[in-house]
Image (cartoon, rainbow, N blue to C red):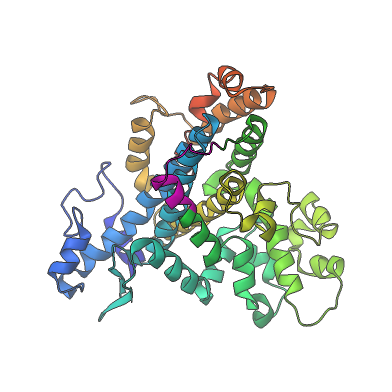
Amino acid sequence: MVVGELASLLPLTSDTWFPQGNDYLDDPQAQIRADNNNVPLSRRSHFLRYVAASSFVHCGDAWSYLGRSLDALIRGDLTGSIHLLYYAELRAAISLLASEGIFIGNRHHLTVDANDTHHLSTEGTHRAVWQILERWAQENRSLDLLYDVFRPGRSPFSDWMQRLTPLAARAKIEQLLEVISFDLKSFDTDHKQRNRASYQPTRLKPRDVDSAAVQSLVSETWRYLEPGPGGAFPVLDDALLPEMLTAIFHSRCDPTPPWIDWVTSITPPSLEGSALAVALQDNDKRTNDSTLLGALYPAENSETDAVKCIRPMTARAVVLLRIATGSCVSLLRDSGHDTNAISAWTTSLAVGRGLWSPGKEPSNRLDLWADIEIALEEINAATPTTRSDFLRTLPTSLLALGQAERVPVWSFA
């Protein structure tokens, strides 16, 4: 239902999603309460349009939080970075659920069908989001989305699954999604970290992240975000492929065939002999713990120390944001529109955040990556000793590396 309502809402003629108004625009919670905690048939169209539009806006906001988190980390504000990272995760999750037609409010979390309103939880926003997300992750729809969204080797993940039986392809979905950070315990830990960062005095016992560690984390995070056409994340998707395949491989009841034969048997014909396929044949283990994606695993995943938890939190945020962004792109495509249909809004976002001046949009939005390349060269050339020395070597990078709004601007282009 949300797809059809988005189709009727687009294309946007201005940066305002609802130029003619919407019953839920100013305060959706108040409207739901006024309607006895339901969505009456007379408002169903307004509600679904609001939810559809919110998926894109929540996604843009989530990327903004990630950028501000990286900026805070570079400047030495660890607790501020944690606070912002958590909200990047939260808003990415809300975006993903909205793209599936699920409204997240404050103790009113619901979805609708042609006949009725379905209440999903009466918990507060934070706990409800992770509980609903966990339930969604156990549904077939979640795997269908992953098949469509992830495109390692520029091929849909579904192409890698075609040679498996439907039962084998869908087996152990909980383990598969847990690998890429959808375990409720991890997100609940992040919420606790956010509470400490947000409400406790920060430097009674000062803890700082070494500048070299910051340099590595920020650089690696941005490298994973290098864009491809059509909202693609080629570097991140290629890095996640062995994680997903390893989870499926080790969930099998039958220990045969061995890894190399199994991977060879499911590699899409178009990628046989490719560098990606060859690398996979030599990799039947999960990512090395020294990488950002390696931080998703238990050794770091359960960390409660602020200095040590920043890497797994960043990894979870990046993966969840990638899925949310891909889900928005899929929603747009399923509605029968392309990204030009929301260009008025993404242009407004870019101008408002200083990515370009009014009327000076680049001919290709992927060119926004060039600024990041320059920034990465600058940050990788730095030899930080003190925080002050580190900051003084990054006059250009400081701005660009905190502008993660670039990602939705080039992904929805």
Viewer-closest of 313 and 143 = 313
| Residue 348 lies within the magenta run | no
Q: Quadrant of the C terminus?
A: top left
Residue 1: x %, y % from top left? 33, 70
Identify the image quadrant of residue 3: bottom left
| Residue found at x 79% / y 52% | 274
| Residue found at x 61% / y 34% | 214
Identify the image quadrant of residue 375: top right
Q: In this view, does 306 lie to the left or right of 28?
A: right
Residue 353: x %, y % from top left? 38, 32
| The magenta segment | 193-206
Vertical position of residue 278 compared to residue 394: above or below: below
Q: In this view, does 33 lie to the left or right of 321?
A: left
Vertical position of residue 78 compared to residue 41: above or below: above
Instruction: Please indicate, yes or no, whether residue 329 appears anywhere in the rendered image.
Output: no
Viewer-closest of 295 and 221 = 295
The residue most toward the left is 34
Residue 299: x %, y % from top left? 69, 57
Instruction: Please indicate, yes or no, whether residue 28 appears anywhere in the rendered image.
Output: yes
Residue 193: x %, y % from top left? 49, 52
Q: Is residue 50 left or right of residue 183?
A: left
| Residue found at x 39% / y 34% | 350
Viewer-closest of 286 and 279 = 286
Q: Is residue 402 left or right of residue 2?
A: right
Count the numbered circles shown: 0
Vertical position of residue 64 compared to residue 139: above or below: above
| Residue 195 lies within the magenta run | yes
Viewer-closest of 285 and 290 = 290
| Residue found at x 47% / y 59% | 327
